[in-house]
Amino acid sequence: MIPGGGRRALVALLAVAAVAVSGCDSKGGGTGGGPVQDNGAGSVSGLPVTHFESGLKPDAPKPKLNVRNADGGEDDKLATAAIDDVQTYWGEMLPANFGEQFEPVKSLLSYDAQSDTEETGCGSVKKLVNAFYCPVDDSVAWDRGVLLPMLRQRFGPMSVVVVLAHEFGHAVQYRLGDKAGIAKNTPTVVKEQQADCFAGGYFRWVAEDKSKFYRVSTSEGLNQVMASMFLIRDQAGTSAADKGAHGTAFDRTYAFQAGFEKGPKECAGMNTENVKARLTERPFDKGDKGKGDAKFNAQTVALLKKSLDEAFKGAGVAAPEITDGGSCQTTPPASYCPDDNTVSIDMAKLAQLAQPIDRQAEMQGEDPGGMGDFAAFSEVAARYALGIQKGVGASIDNANAGLRTACLVGAWAAFTNRPGDLRLSAGDLDEAIADLLQPESLVSADVKGKRPDSGFDRVEALRKGYLEGSSVCSKSYA
């Protein structure tokens, strides 16, 4: 976030008082054409919350595909099965949704970026740590030497599958042509949003147990997928107009969830106009010396308190005070204390959390140091939001309270996305997502620190509040 000196009009969040649950519908609505379906913490987009080991099914058949240069190792097996599976999916979806017969890609290539020099229609793979679709020769290629094993070891086998499903999404764009609305001048980030969305549609099909090869749980399994998508986000400060822009973690998970919830027609409807209207990817503001990361100290906590007070003024209830130390430490490093309506924080631990992410360490699987200032600010904002909810008579000690809290944090984040004493900066929303995907995160936790099992739901709740405002929080998570 960026501490500033400007003044702004007080803009109250919409209908915060509606979180008093009388007469609320548990199914949320929304605007903007994105993911809106939700049934609270008891489901993941209408599917049950499930817990089991995700990956290849024990009785999965052997893929009948010819892969050039394959070595038969674990990552090649995962990738080949993923391609076989996703081709089956599109064999069903293209005729059903677009009236098109599906044609498999013409060639598949496995390579080791550390040693191989294989050629594709798009050039050599030498030193290319990547997976890609090449339209010139209608091929899909993947690096089995560096990329896939890194993802698998850190996030599990389904991270390999989502990367291949995404790349195959580009092959689908190529096949759909005008029906996908993609032209030569379409920005890269729009193409990437579609491909992420197509991958989400495929994962819904897997989660519904329609795959011969894979199974994925809607809790830990989808959590791994979301975490891997977070890792491959663009660097904070990237412009969406950059030629190679792929999107922030916020943008990429939005697109994936849109496909998971609404299917491939929703994805094909993503175009330059509606994607650009909601993208969060932007350069750092001029004069942002901290590159989006402010110090977490008494001064910025005071600015945070002022921002929260302004944002939630419309609720018409007493605002919680924020104290270093305080009367209770139930969910450190930040706790809401109902007895005296205070938020008790551990300044030192939150300052450590607020340290900028070390991107190089993160990519190497090492301790990234911190999660960024907005992760720390969001944890405090979440505890503050519990006080507002208690004030209007809403529950604060169940799973829906946790999701409602994450949603209100998202609505507050949108409130700060304008000039003011404390304003949102490039990369902040990704820092909140990084926190949400952690098992100990407080952003989607109830007053006792309990959070929903599904990272998919936790991220979706934040996004809903950010894009649709606070009124959707009570409607979706009554």
Image: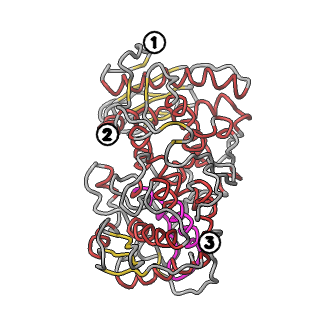
Per the model, the C-alpha gap separating discs 2 and 1 is 26 Å
Q: Which of label 2 and label 3 is nearer to you?
A: 3
Query: In the rendered image of this protein, does residue 174 appear above or below residue 211?
Result: below
- Identify the residue shown where x is 64% and y is 25%: 93
Query: In the rendered image of this protein, does residue 186 appear above or below residue 430?
Result: above
Q: Position of residue 463 (x, y in %)?
A: 55, 56
Quadrant of the drawing holding the C terminus: bottom right
For residue 427: magenta? yes
For mark 2, give the secondary structure.
Answer: helix
Question: Is 375 left or right of 365, judged from the image as shown?
Answer: right
Along the line of sight, which residue is nearer the eye, 276 or 250? 250
Q: Position of residue 129 (x, y in %)?
A: 38, 39
Q: Residues within 10 Å of mark 2 (few under 14, many from 20)?
A: some
User: Which residue carries the number 3 mark?
Assistant: 13
Chain-order first, disc 3 or disc 1: 3
User: Which residue carries the number 1 mark?
Assistant: 64
Q: Position of residue 417 (x, y in %)?
A: 57, 71
User: Which residue carries the number 2 mark?
Assistant: 150
Tell me whether circle 3 and circle 1 mark residues in contact (CB < 8 Å).
no
Along the line of sight, which residue is nearer the eye, 70 or 469? 469
Residue 81 showing in the rendered view:
yes
For residue 144: magenta? no
Chain-order first, disc 2 or disc 1: 1
Q: Residues within 10 Å of mark 3 (few under 14, many from 20)?
A: many
Along the line of sight, which residue is nearer the eye, 9 or 217? 217
Which stretch appears magenta? 407-434
Quadrant assignment, res 160: top left
Amino acid type, label 2:
Met
Per the model, the C-alpha gap separating discs 3 and 1 is 55 Å
